[in-house]
Image (cartoon, rainbow, N blue to C red):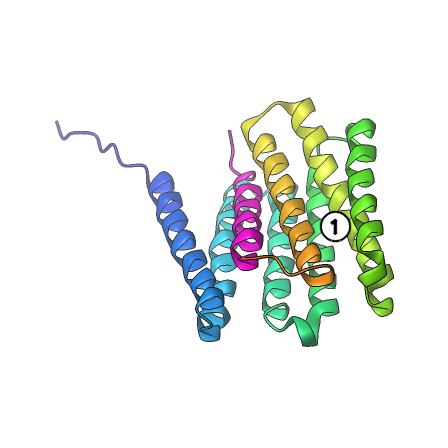
Amino acid sequence: MPARSTLNPTKNSSTLTGVLVAVAVALVLAGHLLLFPWLVYLFKPLATILILSIAFRNRRKLADSYSLWITTGLLCSLVGDVLLIWPSLFFLAGLSAFLLAHIAYLAAFTRDVKFPARPSIWFSYLAIAVALYAFLYPNLPVRLRLAVFIYSVFLSSMAAQAMGRAILLKTTPSYRAAIGAIFFMLSDFLLAFDRFHVLILLAPVLILIPYYLAQWLIAHSTDSL
């Protein structure tokens, strides 16, 4: 009788994707730090496409609304990543793309839990976002003030919903989404601080590593239990 194969194609595919994402992110960071912009142009979108493939694969397998909204959010993020390669030209457009991503993620996190999942968490996250906004407000260009405020509200609401949902559901995928959302807030707060207050040493490393961790975890929140 032939031996049963112990290979798990899904697990192997996920491992390979993880390795490719890590390599792509490393090359993006190298492009920023070594001033090789072509590395950023090529591998920044590629890293997001690879992460997007995780949610897209799960969407095809599960055909559920949660993975559909997460996939939509990652598609919007991909657009934002491309636009923000040239922030001096397309910052507002990139911000708008990521706003749509957070709306899509928020829609995903309200598929099985009402909003707000935990009002106390929502108010806490909003308070953090508003405090940072107030701190940066004097340095924000007038044309960006309303857009940044709206973005901050949706970012913090998305992250708060993810955390409240995780507390209620107590499942591994929901915990991944909640931790990913925290990383997203951290990345965006550092980006805002670097852009509108004072330059941060090794900013690409400190901003992009939590960003890609966030997207990776959110994408993997579509994995079935």
Q: Position of residue 21 (x, y in %)?
A: 43, 53
Q: Local crowd at mark 1 within 10 Å, few (<14), some, or many (≥20)?
A: many
Residue 218 falls inside the magenta stretch: yes
Q: Amino acid at mark 1?
A: Ile
Residue range in magenta is 202-225
Q: Name the residue at 46% across, 63% down.
A: 28
Vertical side of 61 occupied by 30: above or below: below
Based on the displayed image, in which of its 4 quarters is residue 78 positioned? bottom right
Q: Position of residue 73 (x, y in %)?
A: 65, 53
Q: Quarter of the image for the N terminus: give it.
A: top left
- Look at the image and tell me whether residue 63 can be seen: yes
Is 41 left or right of 15, judged from the image as shown? Answer: right
The residue labelled by disc 1 is 103
Based on the displayed image, in which of its 4 quarters is residue 23 positioned? bottom left
Residue that protrudes farthest toward the left in the picture: 1
Instruction: State the residue in front, 198 or 51.
Output: 198
Instruction: State the residue in front, 56 or 89.
Output: 89
Vertical side of 160 occupied by 143: above or below: below
Is 211 left or right of 135, judged from the image as shown? Answer: left
Q: Name the residue at 54% across, 59% down.
A: 204
